[in-house]
Image (cartoon, rainbow, N blue to C red):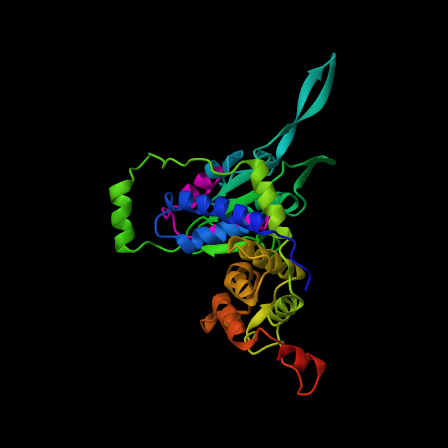
Amino acid sequence: MNSPQLSTEKLTFAVNKLDALSENLNQVLFGKESLIELVIVGILARGHILLEGLPGLGKTELVKGLSKALSITSKRVQFTPDLLPGDITGNPILQDKDGQKTFVFQPGPIFTNIMLADEINRASPKTQSALLEAMQERRVTVMGETHQLPHPFFVLATQNPIELEGTYPLPEAQLDRFLFKINVDRNSADILTRIVLNREIGIEPEVAPVLNAEELIELMELARQVAMPEAVANYIGRLVNATHPGESEASQGVKYGASPRAALGLATAAKARALRQGRAFCSFEDVAAVLPAVMEHRILLDHMARLDGNTPAKVVAKLLEEIPAQEKALPGTLAAAKIR
């Protein structure tokens, strides 16, 4: 285990700031505490987040509230079937400079701290792919010229279920670049009553800034410093490996399992959750808590498994039951002694 580097003062600073952020966001989206906690963990982990749910559940309001609470720049792109890649990344524009015609790059809306990709699966796959380089390398290349994006940079995307008209499924390569995919469920009757009493159509909730860009970057750096015990890293490796066909009982019906990027994302998210909880090291509990959001969108089932009613969520639930936190060791071995 690498030694904890975080002092009590730093942990207290992080918890206080994140508590204030959580309180603000809970005033934007009522009754979604667990969803908001996942979004905060995803931001701490420098990850991109995909929110899926039916229209009208507050996905867009949550993202807009987050950008206000973090006091950083944000831009919204409404994804439509006629949207072009250049509408996102920007285009070179022919301009007259010193009597000569020359191309000058005009940055698109992706040059911001938070880009809200609203209803991302309503755009064509060609347009969706314009985000691939930006999400992985935090840069865009247009006509052979590379442009760095601001720091920090996040894509927070919303999408409608693929069963709805006019949607295109996101390609696996792009799904893999989202750290989290979070399902936004409908509200209960009590929450709907609270919404009716406290909201009006067309009037956005007021959100006070609680973090600036420098503080957010500091918190993300603190999350990186959270210690990763070797036993927890081993647990992550075994979980990711078990998603592949033939590696576990839970993987029956799985066509493609999770990638090494999933393992790195799982580790980063677990460390971020540990910081959110005020701890200098991550635990098995942190891994289990973020596993569904990290893993479900990275597991592809075969046709027969889908017909039988199997889902990635069920696969992940079985993985948590099947894969023990501590690796089993033969009696009398050094590993067995360490586990005891």
Residue 296 position in % (x across, y down): 52, 62
Q: Residue at x 50, y 49 (%)?
A: 15
Assess whether residue 110 is covered by the magenta stretch: no
Q: How many marks can you see?
A: 0
257 or 31, which is in the foreground? 31
Q: Which residue lies furthest to the top in this view?
A: 99
Q: Residue at x 69, y 87 (%)?
A: 332
Can residue 81 be spotted in the picture? no
Compared to 89, does 178 lie above or below? below
Compared to 24, does 272 lie above or below? below
Residue 152 position in % (x across, y down): 60, 40
37 or 261, which is in the foreground? 37
The answer to whether residue 174 is left or right of residue 67 is: right
Residue 267 position in % (x across, y down): 62, 60
> In which quadrant of the rendered image does the C terminus lie?
bottom right
Q: Which residue is drawn at 61% across and 49% down?
A: 222
Q: Which residue lies furthest to the bottom in this view?
A: 331
Residue segment shown in magenta? 44-67
> In which quadrant of the rendered image does the N terminus lie?
bottom right
The answer to whether residue 195 is left or right of residue 178 is: left
Assess whether residue 45 is covered by the magenta stretch: yes
